[in-house]
Image (cartoon, rainbow, N blue to C red):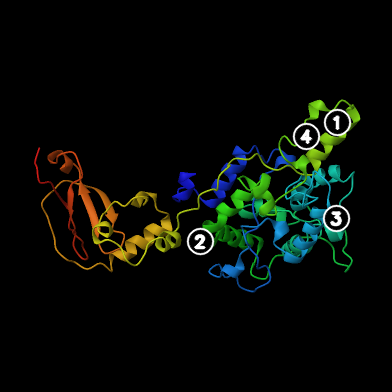
Amino acid sequence: MLQWQRGHLSNYQYLLHLNNLADRSCNDLSQYPVFPWVLHDYCSLELDLSNPETFRDLSKPVGALNKERLERLLTRYQEMPEPKFMYGSHYSSPGYVLFYLVRIAPEYMLCLQNGRFDNADRMFNSIAETWKNCLDGATDFKELIPEFYGDDVSFLVNNLKLDLGKRQGGQMVDDVELPPWAQSPQDFLQKSKDALESNYVSEHLHEWIDLIFGYKQKGSEAVGAYNVFHPLTYEGGVDLNSIEDPDEKVAMLTQILEFGQTPKQLFVTPHPRRITPKTKSSSQTSSYNASTADSPVSPGEESFEDLTEESKTLAWNNIAKLQLHEQYKIHKEAVTGIAVSCNGSSVFTTSQGMFSHLKKGFPRVIVSTFLHSQSRTVLACATPT
């Protein structure tokens, strides 16, 4: 978790890690890794990742993104006898996985559909149509799979020249229709990856994690987040060993395997958010104590090595804006550490071996900064060893 918070793991890598911890595997269609829809705009000619309106609200499950549909679902939920649930279908199931992968795994779809493909108009024909159906469909609440943020475009292209049927409009089902902002399948995947790793998603991904793997997965928090699925989809939702009728047990197991399973719950408290340049700057106030602002070490702040590549680039670019105040060139050992003050006005460096001349305790720091030439911090102590 800390590696992801500090930018050592990408959002993609962290989601794969969480899926693995929750026993989700690409080798199991009934527990396939689940990834979020992160974009809301599949119609524009250009994809603007700097605009928050481009993105999906990650604090809500897919079923709660459409207010009118949610109101209808809640009305049914309130009138339903126990055990209650808001969504009759799940966000991840073998059918949904094969819906996305039919062009590279047609044999599995044929097995699931008793030797035939699904109706051509219900196939994975278009990214925009699929997203629209997830927003407006009465029973469609599916999320995505890792392939949407990978490098292999095969699942988007009918390389096998499969006869997937003819749609009502007369056109044959072939390659997946891409959004206008994607010039090719490769471009679509690259822009999807850019969106997943964007600042907006990095700042809000923890909210989606709370829904799928965290404390909003079950109980009263799930009810408040409109995140309640059929009891059979949850781990431990039914005790199969207590069912004596073999036919009933087989039917129950089949329903569990084929209609979706909620991942194992990994967190019971809110998941921390990722540290990004925006969240870091917003947590700082315009007024602060001078001694704290000039300190190279502040409580809760990460070291330079813990920053993301984007943050490192920003930090180095800011060095050129610093103004030279005064220089202290006393120690001549190799520089072993560097930090920028909270207000961005000072650069601190340390030298190996300097602490051997100081008493244990907190030494006083004399600030030095540089612009065109290097200067180093002098650490002074009133009482020598």
| Residue type, label 3 | Asp
The spot of residue 156 in percent (x, y) is: 71, 57
| Residue 133 visible in the shown view | no
Query: Which residue is at 61% across, 60% downward?
Result: 192
Q: Residue 199 carries which label?
A: 2
Residue with the mark numbered 4:
238
Which comes sooner in the sequence, label 1 or label 2?
2
Circle 2 or circle 3, nearest the eye: 2
Q: Is residue 299 left or right of residue 179?
A: left
Instruction: Check if mark 1's residue and mark 4's residue have beta carbons within 8 Å.
Output: no
Instruction: Check if mark 1's residue and mark 2's residue have beta carbons within 8 Å.
Output: no
| Residue type, label 4 | Val
Residue 245 or residue 137, whichever sits in front = 245
The residue carrying pointer 1 sits among few (fewer than 14), some (14 to 19) or many (20 or more) residues within 10 Å by Cα, namely some
**Residue 265, picture quadrant:** top right
Q: Residue 163 carries which label?
A: 3
Instruction: Check if mark 1's residue and mark 3's residue have beta carbons within 8 Å.
Output: no
The residue carrying pointer 3 sits among few (fewer than 14), some (14 to 19) or many (20 or more) residues within 10 Å by Cα, namely few
Which comes sooner in the sequence, label 2 or label 4?
2
Residue with the mark numbered 1:
249
